Amino acid sequence: MAADTLQKRIACFILVLLTLASFGCEPGAVAAPAPTTEPITIVTSAPMQESTPTPLPQSQLKYIFLFIGDGMGYAQVQAASDALSAAQLDPLCFLDFPVLGNMKTTNIDDAVTDSAAAATAIATGQKTVNGYLGLDAEKNLIPAISETLRDAGRKIGLLTTVSLDHATPAGFFAHVDSRRNYAVITDDLLASGFDFFAGGGFHSTPDAQEYAEENGYTFIRSFEEAPVGTDGKLILSTSLIFGDYGVLPAIDGGARTDWLKKATELAISRLKNPNGFFMMVEGARIDYFCHYHDAASFVAELLDFNEAVESALAFYALHPQETLILVTADHETGDVSFTEGNRGALLLQTVSSDICDNTLVAACLAAKTPFEEALPLFVSAFGLENLTPDETAYLKEGYYRTMANSMPGNTSDEESGVYEAITTACIRLVAARAGIVFGSGGHTRKDVPLYALGIGAEFFGGSFENTNIHTAILQAVAAYPLY
Ligand SMILES: [Zn+2]
């Protein structure tokens, strides 16, 4: 045997040993076995004594959860994780999922994606043009995984904290060349035959309820109105509306607290059936607050999203041989990075910038409240205790600018951002204290993480394009068939 052949064989043997060792990986480590269409079989040694062997439970991929944090890149996850750690709270529940994937997010032109092209890529397995939903670049209709699984007899649920006709959920049922064509999107939603929707209203379809009922849906606005039992198709279009559409921000609390978690639990209770379900749950406003550089509010949205994942984990604990949970994002927003800071400052703010403008700032403007009286209110709302003289001067400047040139609603100005100057000063101070830096007001082409747990999770390891989610779900379904 030639020496170089022997060396190759030794190298090969070592590689096999290393590969085997890596499969026994620590939680959180990257596990990327090659995708296979065969179910994993566990080989056990022969029993030492006479007994009736207990058959191993047959794994079937019955229940699929796909959680999408809109705009949730690695830095967003780390910001939330650091904040929890600083406050000595439990970590994000999905960080120790056994399989970690790294996902590329660019659109068909290798450009920064919008949520429509991203949702289409994830749902259909084909990249497309920004703004398109369920169509390829030539405008051919392409089926979404939700439609394929519906046709295979599974129940389908779509949940979001924005409107139900918004781009991410729409990528799972709509086929239209403009994400803003809300009338077509609503028609496609009602024609989908999907079993469960939960979100914050419809953009431009005030009579959505009437259409929904004509199409066989029960239409409710709160959890209390949910019909008893699990039969029938349901749309929960919450009355907790933010601005024109969408669910109120998580950070503002009140009745909004736990909404996504409760919606996920309601979806589970209604969709669970012997033929299985597919559920997409979107934490939609992580993106929104990254666009507008409100760091504490995006972290609150991410923690709210994490609570919804916890509901899926509780379900997984009861059905570990039948459940797959995927947690990922459609793209990163805000080009978030870090400097030194106390990330715990992100958990002290108790109002979103939007609601601050509409309540606290509006009240100060109406009453012409002097800065000295207003300051403690802003300090309390944003958790800005122990101001330094420089910080106080910074807030004072913002407050005077608000009082000098603004009325409620006059909130767009290049220097201040989209909010009132005092609100912008407060969120910038929170971000500075927490060491959060926003490099952009838009989406970026940064990769995003994917965390996978459960039956078929092995198909989601390694580095891949966003289109691979569609492919890998189909592979997992084929590998662990129901019958
Ligand atoms: Zn966005």
Image (cartoon, rainbow, N blue to C red):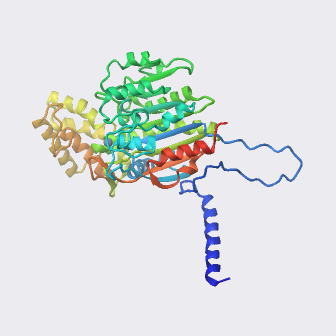
Residue at the location (27% across, 50% down)?
A: 440
Q: Quadrant of residue 349?
A: top left
- Left of 204 or right of it: where is 45? right
Residue 321 as seen in the image, left or right of residue 93: right
| Residue, far left | 404
Q: Quadrant of ligand 1?
A: top left
Q: Nearer the viewer, residue 294 or 36?
A: 36
Residue at 18% from the left image edge and 48% from the top image edge: 394
Image quarter of residue 364: top left
Relative vertical location of residue 349 with respect to residue 29 in this rendering, above or below? above
User: Which percent across, then down, holds residue 402?
Assistant: 15, 38
Q: Quadrant of the C terminus?
A: top right
What residue is rendered at 20% in x and 36% in y? Answer: 374
Residue in the image at 41% along x and 27% along y:
189
Please indicate, yes or no, whether residue 386 appears anywhere in the rendered image: no
Residue 50 in view here: yes
In the image, taking residue 328 as reference, residue 202 lies left or right, namely left
x, y (%) of residue 157? Answer: 49, 31
